[in-house]
Amino acid sequence: MSRPEYNVYRSRPGFLSRLRPGRRDATPGGLRPSGGGRGRLRRALSPGRVLKYVLAVLVAWLVLTAAVFFLSAALQPGVSSRTQSALRTGPAQSLLTGSTILVLGSDARSAQTKEPGAGGPPRADSILLLHAGLGRVRRLSILRDSAADIPGHGTQKINAAYALGGPALTVRTVEGFLGNQVEVAHVIEVSFDDFPKLIDAMGGIDVTLRRCVRSAPFGGRKFSLKRGERHLNGRQALAFARVRKNLCAPSEDDRARAARQQQVLSAMRSRLLSPLAFPRLPFVAWQAPRTLGSDMQGLGLSLLFLDVATAGGAETEVLEPIADGPGGTLQISDQEKQEAVSRLLGD
């Protein structure tokens, strides 16, 4: 009776056993037989190979983040043709060589809320100029109550331009307000409806308060924060940035409000650069373009975000008023404007 033919197979060692020191089945040089010892040798898993695998995963995660960002940006509608025609586009306004970007936050309120002005035309809740290029970003904030000549509408608070003519009229108003040196090449509109979702995608932000912040009810809700270090979710961060009259400090004016908005932006940047944000990057990349309306496509927005991330924590300059004007406006001197513009443009 002949012996039956059969094959002998040996299972591969598990991942942890490969890392165990002093294995006896390894051949000299750190090579082990592969496939039951037939011919081929496979190098043992070393710390160097583990590092390569980790780096490969990190690079793949960053590539996925970039792909998600470009896809999300491509799905956004952009700006109207009227707004596009108001922008100064051309080689001189490249994000590589330096260009001026107008960032607008609208205070649009749903008619379903109980806030004053709900359902009415939105005004610009924040007006910020960025001059960005090659890792350098300079910022200039304009108080929304600053008196400005709005083309076709006379002198009013500068934020009224948004309600009267949208981003296009706001671009013209800001350029006239600051002088001929300023040419706005791009515009970004921040959606306060989607802003909390972006903060939540980051995992929230951390802010440090020197004094408490408490506001009268708006949006049907009260808002209050004690002083000290606080972790804010998206809804809290938006409410913190929008507080106009702080009941904890009645003497505060619109400059304190602008400072809180800059504090939120700084906290967002710090959060994104934190290792804790790395696992969340694709989710942030998907939400960021949905929060912004801009003439810039995915490449332009990605270059801007890169500039902001690598530009350091430079403070935002605020145009300081010299006096109160009629109708609750703030008067800004021409000299203050000229000096601020020179610093913004790096002249």
Image (tube, grey):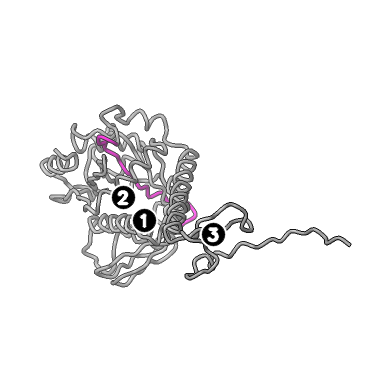
Question: Mark 2 highlights which residue?
Answer: 309
Q: Residues within 10 Å of mark 1 (few under 14, many from 20)?
A: some
Question: Mark 1 highlights which residue?
Answer: 272
Q: Quadrant of the C terminus?
A: top left
Give the amino acid at mark 1: Leu
Q: Which range is magenta?
A: 96-113
Earlier-in-chain disc, 2 versus 1: 1
Give the amino acid at mark 2: Ala
- Cα separation, mark 3 vs mark 1, equals 43 Å
Q: Is residue 187 magenta?
A: no
Q: Residues within 10 Å of mark 3 (few under 14, many from 20)?
A: some
Can you say whether 63 is above or below 151 in the image?
below
Residues at circles 2 and 1 in contact by the CB criterion of under 8 Å: yes
Give the amino acid at mark 3: Arg
Earlier-in-chain disc, 3 versus 1: 3
Look at 45% across and 60% down and name the residue there.
46
Image coords of residue 203 (percent x, y) = 43, 61
Determine the residue located farthest toward the right in the rendered image. 1
Q: Quadrant of residue 89?
A: top left
- Cα separation, mark 2 vs mark 3, equals 46 Å
Where residue 162 is drawn, which disc sits there?
A: none
Q: Is residue 99 magenta?
A: yes
Q: Secondary structure at mark 1?
A: helix
- Cα separation, mark 2 vs mark 1, equals 8 Å
Side of 302 relative to 21 (left or right): left
Q: Secondary structure at mark 2?
A: helix
Question: Mark 3 highlights which residue?
Answer: 32
Image coords of residue 182 (percent x, y) = 21, 35
Image coords of residue 224 (percent x, y) = 35, 69
Of circles 2 and 3, the one toward us is: 3
Side of 76 relative to 147 (left or right): right
